[in-house]
Image (cartoon, grey):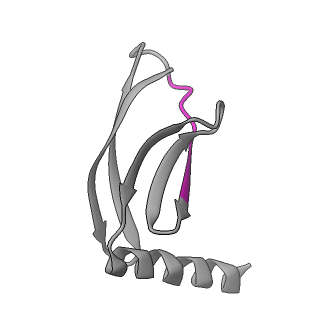
Amino acid sequence: MVDTIEISRVNIRDSLSVDLSVWMNNPNDWQFQPTLSVTGNTFTVSSKETGDSLASIELDDEQLEAVQREEIHSHLLN
C-alpha cells in the first residue's frame, strides 16, 4: 500500500514529463498501480485499486497545452 506520493518535478520534453517519488508502507510491496488524469488544469495521481487521489498539482498554461497536444496525437494514432 502507498504511504506517500510526492510530485517532485513537472517539465516538458516531447510531452509532459512528471517525476514522482513514491513511498510504500512496506518496501517489498510492488502492487502500486497509479492512474493519471487531468481535469481543468489539475494533474492528479490516483490509486487504480481504490480510486483515492494520492497527489495533485496545478499545471501552467504551457504544461496544459503539452497535455492537450499529446491527447490529440494519441487520438490520431488510435
Asked which quadrant contains residue 42, the reply is bottom left
Residue drawn at (68%, 86%) of the image: 76
Q: How many marks?
A: 0
Q: Position of residue 45 (x, y in %)?
A: 49, 47
Residue drawn at (41%, 15%) of the image: 25
Q: Is residue 10 left or right of residue 42?
A: left
Q: Is residue 14 left or right of residue 67?
A: left
Asked which quadrant contains residue 52, the reply is top right
Residue 32 sits inside the magenta stretch: yes
Residue 4 sits inside the magenta stretch: no
Closer to the camera in the image, 78 or 66: 66
Residue drawn at (65%, 30%) of the image: 50
Q: Residue furthest right?
A: 78
Residue drawn at (45%, 58%) of the image: 43
Q: Position of residue 24 (x, y in %)?
A: 40, 22
Q: Residue furthest front?
A: 40
Closer to the camera in the image, 39 or 8: 39
Task: Tell me the quarter of the image containing the C terminus.
Answer: bottom right
Image height check: is 76 above or below 57? below
Q: Which residues are magenta?
A: 30-37
Q: Is residue 8 left or right of residue 28?
A: left
Q: Position of residue 12 (x, y in %)?
A: 31, 73
Closer to the camera in the image, 51 or 8: 51
